[in-house]
Image (cartoon, rainbow, N blue to C red):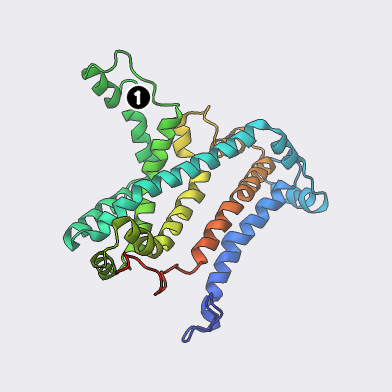
Amino acid sequence: MKSLSGHRLSGAPDWAVIPSYIWLVGFVLLPLLIVSLVSLATASLGPSVELWDRVAVNGLLAPTSENYRALLASGTYVDATLNSVVVATATTLLCLIIGYPMAYAIARAPLARRQLLLILFAALFCTSALIRTYAWTEMFDTAGPVNEGLRALGLIREPLAFLGAAPAVYLGMVYAYLPVMVLAIYLSLLRLDYSLVEAARDLGARTGRIFLLIIVPISLPGVIAGCLLVFIPASGEFAVPWLLGGKAFPAVGTAIWTEFFVVQNWPRVAAMVALLLLALIVPTVFLFKAALMPVIRPTPRQQIGPVQ
């Protein structure tokens, strides 16, 4: 087996990667192939016992681009896809801005406090994300604790409609994906040798320069991994936009759910999924290429402090 640099890894036989390839083919490539095949079938197909027979006939022998043309001509689906990508991008940036200082604080904390903080973050994953999102609907309800508290303080007279608005969706998305970003960055910051920071500080380097030349390059793989783990699932998120934004909030997850369970047009749903994957290819490939880039370290000639 060869590494990314092309060198053979000692002690790692080629057959050791066969189960990984089987898993990728069986659970990634094959489902994508089936989805692509269904998306090329006629739009009249729905759930039935003869579905796969009709897909094989209409998808292989008489493929049609009718589903793709209908979706691209539909402003509703295009708006929902673009809005989902915008929400996912904003969620990723907000999680990065909020999560980086939190991850750094956890990595710098004493061992006992660090373990406690990690347990608190891990505890969030012990509860279903759907239940945690549903709890926000109770908090932001017109008769919920947020409105009641504002009314008790005399700040409002009438309850505010938090639900159904974009800020509630962004809050729910950041709340759902922030722990993923924090843990990804935290794992990369564990590799940081803080003696380098102390040495740079002794040489007179300022905090901003230390952060840009030492801390950021070392934590960059974790940052990119966190962005991937947040952006990709957030693009197709269904529960948060549905519960906090309402049915009227344009989101691709809501559109797919409606087409699948209400309209029951499976080829149209497959085309929706295929178009969403195409929309995510460019940012995902960009992040993967950035993740594979070598960590940039200052050369001996680069000064990290003032010249003596």
Q: Is residue 291 above or below residue 181?
A: below
Query: Label 1 sits on what residue type?
Result: Asp
At 37% from the left and 45% from the top, the residue drawn is 128
The furthest residue to the right:
62
Res. 118 in view: no
The residue that label 1 is drawn on is 141
Asked where in the image residue 203 lies, by quadrant, the reply is: bottom left
Relative side of 54 to 225, left or right: right
At 45% from the left and 67% from the top, the residue drawn is 296
Asked where in the image residue 5 lies, by quadrant, the reply is: bottom right
Q: Is residue 25 above or below residue 63?
A: below
Foreground of the two, 207 or 226: 207
Q: Position of residue 234 (x, y in %)?
A: 48, 45
Total marks placed = 1
Foreground of the two, 157 or 163: 157
Res. 136 in view: yes
Q: Secondary structure at mark 1?
A: loop
Q: Position of residue 250 (x, y in %)?
A: 55, 32
Q: Position of residue 263 (x, y in %)?
A: 64, 33
The furthest residue to the front:
308
Q: Is residue 154 above or below residue 269?
A: above
The furthest residue to the bottom:
10
Foreground of the two, 76 or 25: 76
Q: Position of residue 103 (x, y in %)?
A: 31, 55
Relative side of 129 to 148, left or right: right
